[in-house]
Image: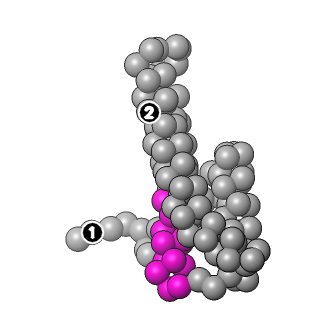
Amino acid sequence: MNNKYTIWESFHFAFEGFRYALQTQRNLRIQLIVAVAVIAISTFLPMQLIEWALLFVLIALVIVAEILNTAIEKTIDLIVKEFDPLAKTIKDLSAAAVLFIAFTTVIVGSLIYLPKLLAFLK
């Protein structure tokens, strides 16, 4: 296998992509703030190891979905220079994927946190 980039260069490119997404995507910044808040709150709750694992997997899925959505939108913008209904549909589908995983995360988070919060309030 002949790869012209070192592993460190590959990591650098990935971090550049993440930095770009962070600088340009408001929703990603909001999602990261919510993720940090949820993790901080979780440190005060009796969390099982599987709940921590699920929490981090869901956070990662939301972030990955947002980054992929950005990549898809930028690709469409590169290819299509004027309004195209198919391009709009592709962008809408990509955004729907982010919305779906975000809603799923809220539902799963509620299943984990509501019983803990109700027990805490008793």
Q: Which of 4 and 106 is in front in this view?
A: 106
Asked if residue 113 lies left or right of residue 84, the reply is right
Q: Tell me if residue 117 is in the magenta stretch.
A: no
Task: Tell me the residue at 63%/85% (across/down).
Answer: 46
Tag 2: residue type? Answer: Leu
Q: Give the range drawn in magenta.
A: 48-61
Residue position marked by numbered label 2 in the rendering: 93
Q: How far apart are marks 1 and 2 (CA)?
A: 36 Å
Q: Nearer the viewer, residue 19 or 55?
A: 55
Q: In which quarter of the image is the C terminus?
A: bottom right
Contact check, label 1 and label 2, Cβ < 8 Å:
no
Task: Tell me the residue at 71%/54% (across/down).
Answer: 29
Task: Tell me the residue at 52%/37% (across/down).
Answer: 95
Q: Which of marks 1 and 2 is nearer the N terminus?
A: 1
Labelled disc at residue 58: none
Residue position marked by numbered label 1 in the rendering: 2
Q: Quadrant of the N terminus?
A: bottom left
